[in-house]
Image (cartoon, helix red, strand yellow):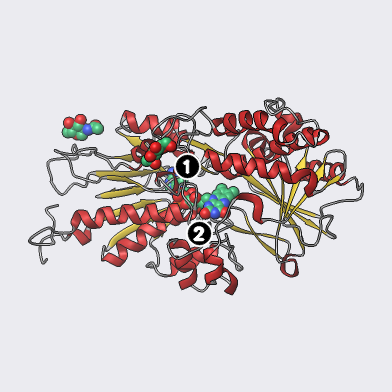
Amino acid sequence: MASQRSSLDSQIFIIGCGISGIGAAQKLIKHGFRNVNIIEATGRSGGRIQTGRLGDNIVEIGANWIHGPSKENPVFRLACDYRLLDKQSMSEENQQIKMDGPTLFNPNWFSSSGQKLGPDVMGPAMELFIKLMEKSQQFNETGGEPLPSVGKFVKTEAERLAPEEWKEDPANIDLRMAMINTLLKMECCVSGTHTMDDVGLGAFGMYKTFPGLDCTFPGGYEGLIDNMMKGLPKDIVLYNKPVKCIHWNNTKNGPDTKTLPVLIECFNGETFAADHVIVTVPLGYLKKHKDTFLSPSLPLHKLHSIQRMGFGTNNKIFLEFEQPFWDDECELIYLVWEDETDLSDVVSDVKMSWIKKIFGFTVLRPTEKFGHVLCGWISGHESEYMETLSELEVLQSITQLLRKFTGNPTVAPRRLLRSQWFHHPYSCGSYTYVAKGCSGYDIDNLAEPLPLNGCNSKPLQVLFAGEATQRSFFSTVHGALMSGWREAERLISHYTPTSGSFTSKL
Ligand SMILES: Cc1cc2nc3c(=O)[nH]c(=O)nc-3n(C[C@H](O)[C@H](O)[C@H](O)COP(=O)(O)OP(=O)(O)OC[C@H]3O[C@@H](n4cnc5c(N)ncnc54)[C@H](O)[C@@H]3O)c2cc1C
Ligand SMILES: *[C@@H]1O[C@H](CO)[C@@H](O)[C@H](O)[C@H]1NC(C)=O
Ligand SMILES: *[C@@H]1O[C@H](CO)[C@@H](O)[C@H](O)[C@H]1NC(C)=O
């Protein structure tokens, strides 16, 4: 190793210090790579994992749950190793629970005429919706789906089945259809999309889940990031350095074979030379900057997949109350607009009616810890518009909304905190969904490293990780982590000798 440069000396830069970037660094360093750095646009680690404060309370501005907390889930395993979860979340019993949609939550329903609705009225709407969502997941990419989108499928089927299924109770059909609308808005938040009409039906079942009842981090999701960062060398992250352009395929910098193939250019003018770059920026950022972020620009099929894949907005609005207006046991509050009985009806005026896109509120628990705090959910263009309003304007609109639905003119949240993921310059939205017309191949295209089949160039110059590049678990924290590990493994196995010396011919 004396004079020769070992593969472990390769200059590796990871762009983005979210969990995928941190995960990649973790694996590379554990393997022995000595020159690994993370370049991060903002002043913090964690990206879309971000814990904030509302008064004395911890609230999650980004990711909240470990989806499917059980042994196969790497985020669950890490959280257990770091002792970040409570006893119940780690119990065998908890790990075996199969989540099936919103059935597990204890609901309250309020209608726009200030009525509280009961399970006798709302239950059948929930059941029908859950059945249709399960059906939506059973299609696959081999074709044969009857309609292009999940939205079209659920609406068509609900309209077809409802009169038959609810014929004993015709007086409630309209309210139940309105509830289906509310549940579609909820699914928009889950998928991070403006409308379920944009979510492809054929590929919807590509998203996989682990068993386990979704759990949270009592001390905040950022505790996971803090613990992972403690395992990395100090100063590994270069903060506040947004990357402007990745210049790759560099053969021009002279005949010197030691010239590194990639040059990273930051907005502040700084440059860094690299053998390998792992890009982990969100798909939203790539969509917005796809024409300038790489030079030479991305190959066409990668560009097309970036364009085709969906990346939308889901935001949270946290509200603190003196007194609850919901039941003791309630975990989820649904708002049912009595005028939304027509499933094909689309909200037209975003500015006037953005508030109607809030499907409801989750109740933060346990109450002994949080007091009376709700989290409102809003997706799509209405969510993006909400971000442009002042906190006070949002608070006033929500106060009006709650007074209307509870029929109580004194309901008044005393504090508010909301997320603004669409206008976040380094997220440009919330997370990935498989849009109409997309397939798993688009995700594979995103994940494909550059150069494509570098016969004459140095291999694996630019690699791609991040939530959007994970075929089965996109849009999640565990999907992001797995993608970072995957790209680290790609580099590790590239340098792992099949025979002879471990030293590469760099
Ligand atoms: C509101 C919301 C709720 C969510 N809820 C859940 C949940 O309950 N459970 C769950 O599993 N997942 C949830 N997610 C998804 C989860 O947060 C993400 O999938 C995951 O955190 C993504 O990690 P990542 O490393 O791929 O990307 P990120 O965390 O976004 O990291 C990318 C990093 O790249 C940086 N960056 C961007 N551009 C540049 C540039 N030009 N130069 C340098 N750095 C740059 C960014 O600043 C960021 O730090 C939620 C997300 C949101 C927004
Ligand atoms: C896709 O669905 C069809 C019809 O339901 C089924 O026959 C086929 O086996 C499925 N393919 C995969 C890969 O799941
Ligand atoms: C990379 O460089 C080589 C040699 O200069 C050139 O032939 C090739 O077209 C380049 N690839 C791209 C994607 O620009």
**For the residue labelled by badge 2, is the local secondary structure a helix, a strand or a loop?**
loop
Q: Identify the residue at image location x=33%, y=54%.
A: 486
Q: Is residue 188 left or right of residue 332?
A: left
Q: Is residue 97 left or right of residue 471?
A: right
**Viewer-side residue, 400 vs 193:** 193
Q: Identify the residue at image location x=54%, y=31%.
A: 198
- Determine if residue 371 is in view: yes
Q: Residue under label 2, please give it.
A: 211
Figure check: 65 above or below 144 = below
Figure check: 24 above or below 125 = below
Q: Is residue 481 left or right of residue 323?
A: left
- Mark 1 surroundings within 10 Å by alpha-carbon count, few (fewer than 14), some (14 through 19), many (20 or more): some
**Viewer-side residue, 343 vs 482:** 343
Amino acid carrying label 1: it is: Gly
Amino acid carrying label 2: it is: Pro
Residue 279 at x, y percent in the picture: 37, 46
Q: CA distance from mark 2 to mark 1?
A: 16 Å
Residue 297 at x, y percent in the picture: 32, 32
Q: Residue under label 1, please give it.
A: 205
- Mark 2 surroundings within 10 Å by alpha-carbon count, few (fewer than 14), some (14 through 19), many (20 or more): some
On-image quarter of the N terminus: bottom left
* Ligand 3 positioned in quadrant: top left
Q: Earlier in the sequence, mark 2 or mark 1?
A: 1
